[in-house]
Image: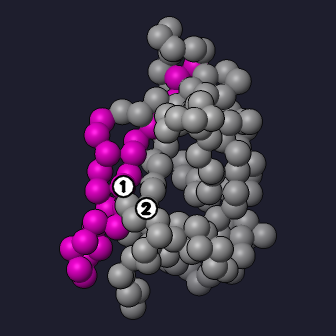
């Protein structure tokens, strides 16, 4: 069951449109802690084995939005640099990381990084229209203090 299937069971007007805080505090934190997330909401995908246009339909919410989990791959086994390369191109970070703030406590609970997909290899990559927002917990070992009402 994918997001589209869940959306088909909701009454008219309801949409899966989570805020940055909900993505970090609810979905990402629960995934890291191995807590159960509503089955079918977010699937796990290996971004390094497929191009953006090949992502499975199960992660597709509508024509322009996809929500999924993907574990970070290290460029070097002993380093911290992230490998964002695919067979045909690479995801390049653009701009600065944005903070994700808990609206109740005003604490920083996570970060959002914007990535753009380039075809070919750096530095001769050709920019495409594919954009991705990558979220990470700021303190992965501490639960966010957000209470959802």
Residue at coordinates 47% horizontally, 21% vertically from top-left?
127
Please indicate whether residue 79 sits to the left or right of residue 103 in the image: right
Residue at coordinates 52% horizontally, 35% vertically from top-left?
79
Occupied quadrant, residue 137: bottom left
Category of crowding for the residue at label 2, using alpha-carbon neighbours closer than 10 angstroms: few (below 14), some (14–19), many (at least 20): many
Q: Is residue 139 above or below residue 74?
A: below
Q: Which residues are magenta?
A: 95-119
The reply to whether residue 145 is visible in this rendering is yes
Label whose residue precedes the other's in the sequence (1 or 2): 1
Q: Which disc, if any, is residue 38?
A: none
Q: Which disc, if any, is residue 137?
A: 2
Q: Is residue 98 magenta?
A: yes
Q: Position of residue 113 (x, y in %)?
A: 39, 45
Category of crowding for the residue at label 1, using alpha-carbon neighbours closer than 10 angstroms: few (below 14), some (14–19), many (at least 20): some
Q: Secondary structure at mark 1?
A: strand
Q: Residue furthest left?
A: 106
Q: Is residue 132 above or below residue 31?
A: above
Q: Residue furthest top?
A: 124
Q: Position of residue 130 (x, y in %)?
A: 52, 34
Q: Position of residue 65 (x, y in %)?
A: 54, 52
Which quarter of the rendered picture does the C terminus lie within? bottom left
The CA span between labels 1 and 2 is 6 Å
Q: Nearer the viewer, residue 139 or 130?
A: 139
- Would you name the residue on which mark 1 appears? 111
The reply to whether residue 60 is visible in this rendering is no
Q: Residue furthest right?
A: 1
Q: Secondary structure at mark 2?
A: strand
Q: Nearer the viewer, residue 134 or 5?
A: 134
> What secondary structure prevails in the magenta region?
strand
Occupied quadrant, residue 73: top right
């Amino acid at each position: 069951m994918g997001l589209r299937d869940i959306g088909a069971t909701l009454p008219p007007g309801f949409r899966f449109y989570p805020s940055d805080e909900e993505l970090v505090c609810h979905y990402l934190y629960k995934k890291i802690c191995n807590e159960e997330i509503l089955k079918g909401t977010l699937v796990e995908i290996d971004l390094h084995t497929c191009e953006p246009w090949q992502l499975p339909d199960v992660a597709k919410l509508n024509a322009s939005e996809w929500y999924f989990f993907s574990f970070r791959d290290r460029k070097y086994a002993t380093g911290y640099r992230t490998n964002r390369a695919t067979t045909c191109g690479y995801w390049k970070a653009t701009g600065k990381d944005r903070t994700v703030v808990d609206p109740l406590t005003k604490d920083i609970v996570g970060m959002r990084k914007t990535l753009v997909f380039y075809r070919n290899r750096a530095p001769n990559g050709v920019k495409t229209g594919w954009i991705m927002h990558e979220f990470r917990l700021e303190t992965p070992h501490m639960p966010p203090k957000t209470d959802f009402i």
